[in-house]
Image (tube, rainbow, N blue to C red):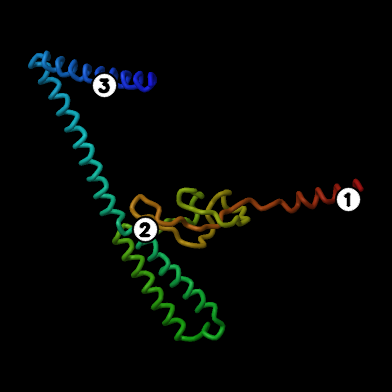
Amino acid sequence: MEKEENQKSHSDNLKETEENKETNKNAEKKDLKPEDKIKELEDKLARAYAEIENQRRRFEKEKDDAFDYGGFSLARETLNLIDNLERSKLALENDEDLKSSDALKKIVEHLNIIQQDMISILKKNNIEEIKSIDQKLDPNLHQAMMEVEDDNKEPGTVVQEIQKGFMMKDRLLRPSLVGVSKKTINKDKNLKENQKSEENQ
């Protein structure tokens, strides 16, 4: 019983203190000079204006991004069509039965026209191919799939493009899948090392 009464009196005391604080704040506000009240209101107004301005900028950026990159996923899916056209051309060109026929030449010409039209449509919509061959490997644009031994190129240079990469304005739509050069292993050096090991045995 005593505990319950103590708890009640404690909670009553807390309520009274909170009420006293509020009345003190109100009394302080009433005691403020008109100039101080004006400064306080100006401060509140400036903060509210700054918040509105920040929100406006954020909405503006979101709107611009939606306008510039709204077709991002559609563009990425469209790249599959270009890949499939390329694969179709290769399959036809490697077909032994069709290799020397005039029909094959016409089909490949038509596929080339379709492919060029698609690439030109993408360019009109700010989607550009990433230039890869003879470029230094850039992990932001290229994905290395294999290494190719080549002493004529500096190591880390793109020497083969497996799949074209594309940019949409300043965003990566798809990285280029590439083969990168590396120095050939010196066979003479290996032979000498093998001979030495045989002599030691």
> Residue 128 has which mark?
2
Q: Which residue is mark 3?
A: 15
Relative to 165, is 35 on the left or the right? Answer: left
Q: Which residue is mark 1?
A: 198
Residue depicted at x 39% and y 78%? 110
**Crowdedness near tag 1: few (<14), some (14–19) or many (≥20) residues, C-alpha within 10 Å:** few
Give the Cα separation between the discs numbered 3 and 1: 96 Å
Q: Secondary structure at mark 2?
A: strand
The correct choice, above or below, for 84 with respect to 21 in the image is below
**Mark 3 belongs to which amino acid?**
Lys
Residue 126 found in image quarter: bottom left
Q: Are marks 1 and 2 in contact (CB under 8 Å)?
A: no
Residue 163 position within the rendered picture, expressed as x and y whole percent measured from the top left: 48, 62
Residue depicted at x 9% and y 16%? 35
**Crowdedness near tag 3: few (<14), some (14–19) or many (≥20) residues, C-alpha within 10 Å:** few
Residue 144 position within the rendered picture, expressed as x and y whole percent measured from the top left: 54, 54
Relative to 140, is 53 on the left or the right? Answer: left
Residue 37 found in image quarter: top left
Give the Cα separation between the discs numbered 1 and 2: 57 Å
